Amino acid sequence: MRSPIPIFIGYDPRERAATNVLIDSLYQHSSTPLAITPLVTPQLEAQGLYNRQRDPRQSTAFSFTRFLVPHLMGYQGWAIFMDCDMLVRRNITELWELCDENFAVQCVQHLHTPGETMKFLGETQSAYHKKNWSSLMLLNCSRCTALTPEYVNTATGLELHQFKWLAGDHEISGLPEGWNHLVAVQEPAKAKGAPLLHWTLGGPWFSEQRTMGEGLAAEWFAARDNAFRLWD
């Protein structure tokens, strides 16, 4: 029997609905047991692992807590990190099988330069090189030992999200683009067949963005209704 795939999900209390639908979509499509852990900030604070003051440019509660995953794994093995504002359409085992010991991190290497300055709930939209790369990561934890709690709590946002804690970009490998399709950012045609949808600008669980992605928003609502329907 395969060991469960360790998956850590960035958690923000404002996006509880998104988190629950993502978790259900992971289970519904997976052929492998999953060990799913939401990164809940107060829990990490209670364990003495996280003590950063909220940065005014920080749009979610998990902007920085994602980088604690290698520590939570004891710097051993592999783990997946993913933002909560996603929906999985295919077997996450397919992504897991792309793990490559030659690299420390694997992610979709978007070329995303935001045209807007605000996103969901009036949060600031920041533009920087490697934007969205850290929203879904395969982490080779034994090669991410620089990510100590002390470093995660003191490094700048750019140092963390631009992978300055690695020896260089040669330690980062790309993943197929469909494993992090940016809804309402990338061309809608690219969503066809994409195994993972990502509502990076805010999703239909927010009342102001119920139609974000149009047909993709309807797909999210269908997944929500299927996850929480009552059985006779």
Image (cartoon, rainbow, N blue to C red):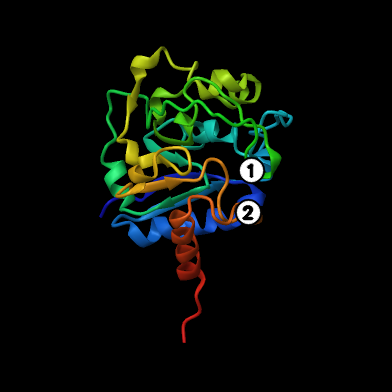
Decide: few, some or many residues near mark 1? Use Cα within 10 Å; few <14, some 14-19, many ≥20: some
Residue corresponding to mark 2: 206
Who is closer to the viewer here, 209 or 3?
209
Residue corresponding to mark 1: 120
Amino acid at pointer 2: Phe
Q: Is residue 118 left or right of residue 106?
A: right
- Coordinates of residue 79 in the picture (x, y in percent): 40, 39
| Residue occupying the point 52% across, 24% down | 161
Q: Is residue 85 left or right of residue 80?
A: right
- Coordinates of residue 198 in the picture (x, y in percent): 46, 44
Q: Secondary structure at mark 2?
A: loop
Could you tell which of marks 2 and 1 lies nearer the N-terminus? 1
| Residue occupying the point 55% across, 18% down | 159
Who is closer to the viewer here, 212 or 140?
212
Amino acid at pointer 1: Phe
Q: Residue furthest bottom?
A: 232
Among the 4 quarters of the image, the one containing residue 68: top right
Confirm or deny contact between disc 2 and disc 1 (CB under 8 A). yes
- Residue 143 drawn above or below residue 50: above
Who is closer to the viewer here, 22 or 190?
190
Distance between the Cα atoms at labels 2 and 1?
Answer: 8 Å
Q: Which mark is residue 212?
A: none
- Coordinates of residue 193 in the picture (x, y in percent): 29, 49
Who is closer to the viewer here, 95 or 131?
131
Q: Secondary structure at mark 1?
A: helix
Q: Is residue 11 left or right of residue 1?
A: right
Q: Residue furthest top?
A: 167
- Residue 217 drawn above or below residue 148: below
- Residue 201 drawn above or below residue 35: above
Among the 4 quarters of the image, the one containing residue 10: top right
